Every structure is written in C-alpha cells, then in structure tokens.
Amino acid sequence: MYDSNDNPHLLIYPFNASGHIIPLLDFTHHLLRHGLTITIIISSSNLPLLHPLISSYPSSLHKLLFSDPDPDHHPSPHPLIAKVIATQQMFDPIVRWFQSHPSPPVAIISDFFLGWTNELAAHLGIRRVVFSPAGALGSSIFHMLWRDLPEINALNGDRDESFLLSLPEIPNSPEFPWRQLSPLWRSYKEGEPNFESFRKGVIGNMTAWGIVYNTFEDLEGVYIDHMKKQIGHDRVWAVGPLLPEEDGPVGRGGSSAVPRDRLLMWLDKKPDDSVVYICFGSIERLSEKEMSVLTSALELSNVDFILCVKTSDLKFIPSGFEDRMSGRGLIVKGWAPQLVILRHRAVGSFVTHCGWNSTLEGVAAGVMMLTWPLGADQFANEKLLVDQLGVGKRVCEGRPENVPDSVELTQLLDESLSCDRPERVKIKELSQTGIKAVKEGTSMRDLDMFINQLCEH
Ligand code: UDP
C-alpha cells in the first residue's frame, strides 16, 4: 500500500468494447485499492462506467476524456481493425498531455489490441504493460496466429473451412478446424496497411515490459508458463478472477434492462441450482434459426431459465413464447446484470458463448457451463472448459452450419441441473480455488508482485 506522498502514477488505456473495458476497470479498482494514482483514457460514451470508481476514489482516479476516434477515417476490410487503427489518433494528444503533466505516469497499461502503445511508451520513456482481456490459452493462440500468419495461411491455400490446424507449439497441442479460427484473423488481407499495422501491434505486445492476465494459476498455469517462455522473462502476472465483490448501483458494464429487485425476487422464489442462465455476451447475436431452436428447446424442457436477448434480436423470439413461459422463464431484453444472476444460489447452469469474461464469471460462480462458442477466442475457451477442466458440456459447435438439434438441446438443458453431474462437482471445486487465489493465493501474490516490480524505480 502506498501513501499519498509516494503513490506511483499509472496511465490505463482500455479498448472500447464491453468485454475489454469491464475487466480493465475491475483491474483499475484493484490498483486503486492498493493506493496507486491512475489516469484512465476513456471516451465520453463510456464515462458512466467510470462513475462508481470516481466517486470511491475522487483524489486518486483521473480521467483523460476523448471523443470516440472515427473509424471511418481508416476504411478497412474489417470494422474491428478500423476501430483499433482509429485509436492511433490518440498518440499525439497523449504525448502532449504527458509532457504538460507535473507528475506524469511511470507506465501505461493498455489493452492487447492497442499494440501501438508500445511505441508510445518508448517515445515517452515509460514502461508498457499489456492487459489481456483474453485468457492465457486464448492469448497464446492469438499471438501465435498473428505472428505466423503467412506460414499458416500457406498451409491452407484453398481456405478449406474444414482444414484442421494443429498448434503443437502450444501446451496440449490444440487443434482447430479453419472455420473456428478468429474471423478477424481469417479476413487478413496481405499488404492492406491497417491489417499490417494491427499485426505489427500484436507482435509488439510480445516485447512489452510485461503482461497481465485475468486468470489464475490453477485454471491456466500451463499457458501462463508458456507465455513466460514465449516472451523470454517472468513478468507475466495472473491476477484473476478480477471480479468486484458486489455489482454497484450503476451496474457492471451497463445498466440493467430489468429492475434488480424484480430479478432478485424472481430468483429468490426458485430452489438452489434450478435455473439455467443463457447469455451470449455483449456482441454476438443469434440468427433467427438459432433463436428458434433455443426457444423451442427451452419450451420443451422442464427448466426454469433467464434468457438474455439483445434488443435487436427480440424480433426472433417466437410470438407468444414469453406468455407461455411466464413463471418459468424470464427474458431480459437488453443488458443483464450477469454477475448478480450468476452469483445467485438459484442459478445452476450457464449457456454461454464462452467469451473470456463470461467463462471466468461462470467458473467463479461455480455454475455448470453449457458451451456454445460463436467466434473470436471462444472455441479455445470451450476446449479449456470441456476437454481440459471437465467443467462444461458442449451444446453447439457454433457457426456457420451447426445449429443444435432442439431435442438434444432440451435434454442437455434438463441434465445440466442434475446434482450428480461430474462437471458440477468439478466447477464448484474450481470456483473455490479461484476465490482463494484472489483472497490469499497465487493471484494475490501476482498482484502484489506486479505492483512492487512496476514501482521499483
Ligand atoms: N455482460 C453483462 N450483461 C449482458 C451481456 C454481457 O453483464 O447482458 C458482461 C459479461 O458479464 C461480461 C462481458 O459483458 O463481463 C462480456 O464479455 P465476454 O468476454 O464474456 O464476451 P464478449 O462480449 O466480449 O463477446
């Protein structure tokens, strides 16, 4: 803990997407609790997410506000690449801010998409720490795929979707059919300046001063060690699960589409481990066909459920479904307070797209995971949950052609709540291990080590 005369100043730069900003704000909270001074670079649209932290730490948390950089200035074959490249407009304004600051930051902690901040840090003469919103397995694959892109692409010149790519360099030698590799990576256009710039940034992450992972040793130890070997030093810290003890009044990541009291009253009436929670994260959308299979399986099953549906997808909910399910099912139309739901004793299983935050939140809550990955690093996270940890069961292989069979899905939903499932027993144990890691174990040790090493100079 640092006192006010001796508190190092850090600059934190999240990437503007819920799955990236939420965990980095959670990490910021931990750093503030340790007495550090933080300036966070944040766009005006995300400012409400910062309010709870600002009101708790008014003198040590500062914001560097900017309007969202315009991706239209950087037309790119992939919108996410354009969005990442647009952030480079921040280079000069950050340098000017830094140079005029009476006590500028000693390091920048930035999202792994913002690889260009390596050059920024070098220009400012400070350290750059990568914050990975992906787990250590997902991140190992992400960095390897971008690094070896030309060689791997050459292996599958015809772009055969079923081509099986083996990654023997990574522990447990994962294999993925081509269609399960990140669409971002698959849409790479050689020589396209924005893609090349993005790739350079990802490769640059590996030369940063250190990397912070929102994971814990008992969950991903082998992949944390692998990353240490890859980057050639030990400054890789696993500090998760980085979850707040309570979801504050504003709501984590967004305000709840359903009044919290109503939701809790509904859950309070249900027996322990009797509710299935279904949510596909902040970005992924279900197709009409996928939604139709899911809703008919829910209708055929005997489970109580909370189904989180983005407002744009409400049109896919079959007519009369909500009325027919009344009492048994609750539909959250928009943002769900996911942590509050997962942590309720009545929730027993989680149909998830396996985004890393959802994966970690499900593990920490000790709910049985029913996996339905759709893209990004989600297939890797599914492998970890199902094949390696044995705490989840596959529900659907994801897009494009694999829509689950509604009868099979019904059976999986019903079975997921039975108390003697081995996955349930294992995930309850893993949840306890995760809680211990943060309170008194490896993640607490890594957080302390990170802060000490960062502030040594
Ligand atoms: N989330 C939430 N309510 C929602 C949808 C998402 O609270 O209705 C949160 C979820 O708890 C997680 C994050 O948004 O912290 C989503 O991150 P994840 O990595 O799981 O998936 P992504 O959205 O990046 O695909």
Image: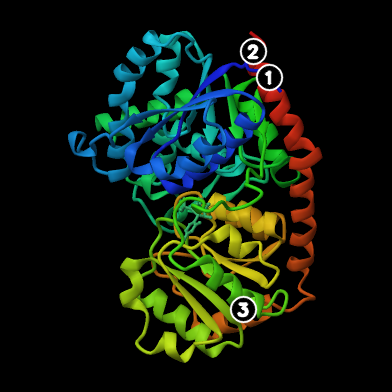
Q: Earlier in the sequence, mark 3 or mark 2?
A: 2
Residue 412 numbered tag: 3
Which quadrant would the C terminus be assigned to in this image?
Answer: top right
Foreground of the two, 42 or 197: 42
Q: Secondary structure at mark 2?
A: loop
Q: Earlier in the sequence, mark 3 or mark 1?
A: 1
Residue corresponding to mark 1 = 2
- Residue 6's disc is 2
Question: Which image quarter is the N terminus in?
Answer: top right
Q: Are marks 2 and 1 in contact (CB under 8 Å)?
A: yes
**Ligand 1: does it lie within 8 Å of the C-beta at label 3?**
no
Q: Nearer the viewer, residue 167 or 220?
A: 220
Query: Looking at the image, do the residues carrying marks 3 and 2 touch, with CB atoms under 8 Å apart?
Result: no
Q: Secondary structure at mark 3?
A: helix
Label 1 crowd bin: few (<14), some (14–19), many (20+), radius 10 Å: few
* Dot 3 amino acid type: Leu
Side of 222 relative to 78 (left or right): right
Q: Quadrant of residue 184?
A: top left
Please state which amino acid type lies under the numbered disc 1.
Tyr
Left or right, 35 with reference to 66: right
Q: CA distance from mark 2 to mark 1?
A: 6 Å
